[in-house]
Image: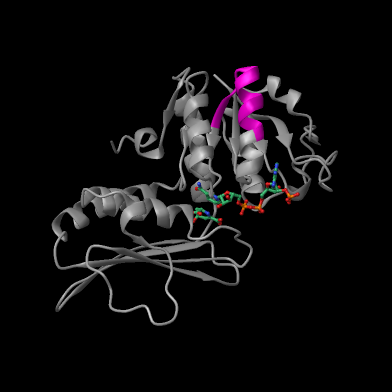
Amino acid sequence: MTLKIAIAGSSGRMGQMLIEAVTNAPDTQLTVALDRTGSDAIGRDACAFMGKDSGVLITDQLSALQNADVLIDFTRPEGTLIHLQACQELGVKMIIGTTGFDEAGRAQISAASEKIAIVSAYNMSVGVNLVFKLLEIAAGVLNQGYDAEIVEMHHKHKVDAPSGTAIAMGEAVAKAWDKSLKDIATWSREGITGPRENGTIGFATLRGGDVIGDHTVVFAGAGERIEVTHKASNRTIYAQGSLRAARFLAKHETGHYDMQEVLGLK
Ligand SMILES: NC(=O)C1=CN([C@@H]2O[C@H](COP(=O)(O)OP(=O)(O)OC[C@H]3O[C@@H](n4cnc5c(N)ncnc54)[C@H](OP(=O)(O)O)[C@@H]3O)[C@@H](O)[C@H]2O)C=CC1
Ligand SMILES: O=C(O)C1=N[C@H](C(=O)O)C[C@H](O)C1
């Protein structure tokens, strides 16, 4: 069966990666390419950036989604929430890779999953999802006398901080410590901060150049330090993960799933 795929943010870094992956896979077909109203990309062939002619023109008309089984959305929270509404109305499933949602945005996604099947994850790569499992084990053992610090670095164009992945890593550690991340997170430090409080999780954000995505969780104890690191060197890892999510969604009509479920890690 061929899956009919729509891509949001078609001219973005991830949008183009996804278009390339969808057009190259044997079981998926690009049927809709969206970008926002006012974008220079509207009316251009979705595959023009690859020097190819697909016949799918980039549009801002959300009614085009009726020609898709699944929308893959890596845009911005405000765009994703508008697409979410259209997908509910048209019965189109969704894969959401966008980061930076507030609690209300996350609640809207969960509520929509009563009508349509949704996979959402702050990181679609196999490697990072494996790291979440490793963190569960590490934090479970290092639950006393170790300070957890999470350092991430991304390209200079990224607009949200800390990264969704860093937050999800913090949530994995906090869960293993039977805590809620919001109660123990130190999101940044500046000035006379005083000594570090035990049981907290610190975050540090670096931005620069073209770094695709580096994450390290440090567990620092007395006499030793354990570091768990993931480094992305190509955005295809996120696109390939999204295709796995699309195949997974073909078997579900409703419900809210994450990549751990898609990858069979839960
Ligand atoms: N879950 C995962 O595995 C990954 C998640 N991400 C996340 O994906 C998102 C996109 O990243 P990236 O591709 O680098 O970003 P880009 O800025 O390169 O692309 C974003 C795209 O979305 C469009 N867009 C922006 N605002 C809206 C809106 N309100 N409505 C509709 N479309 C909109 C942009 O259009 P325009 O250029 O006109 O503004 C652009 O086409 C980020 O949140 C990032 O953190 C990234 C990689 C992996
Ligand atoms: O904006 C990015 O580029 C990335 N965003 C995601 C995040 O915020 O965690 C995933 C990946 O790190 C790349």
Q: Is residue 251 left or right of residue 170?
A: right
Q: Main secondary structure of the magenta part?
A: helix
Rendering quarter of residue 156: bottom right
Residue 18, given in percent of the width and then of the height, sits at 61, 42
Q: Position of residue 241 (x, y in %)?
A: 47, 41
Q: Nearer the viewer, residue 263 or 112?
A: 112
Q: Quadrant of the C terminus?
A: top left
Using the rendered image of the protein, determine whether residue 6 is visible from the camera's viewpoint. Answer: no
Q: Nearer the viewer, residue 87 or 228?
A: 87
97 versus 205 height, above or below: above
Q: Which residues are magenta?
A: 82-94
- The residue shown at (21%, 48%) is 178
Does the magenta portion include 114? no
Out of 264 and 219, give the one closest to the viewer: 219
For residue 178, above or below residue 3: below
- Say whether residue 104 is left or right of residue 88: left
At x 58% / y 72%, what residue is drawn? 208
| Residue 206 in view here | yes
Residue lying at 81% horizontally and 45% vertically, measured from the top left: 41
Name the residue at 17% across, 75% down. 224
User: Is the N terminus in the top left, top right, bottom left or bottom right quadrant?
Assistant: top right
Q: Is 160 left, or right, of 34 in this rendering?
A: left
The image quarter in which residue 211 lies = bottom right
| Percent of width and height locating residue 15 | 65, 45
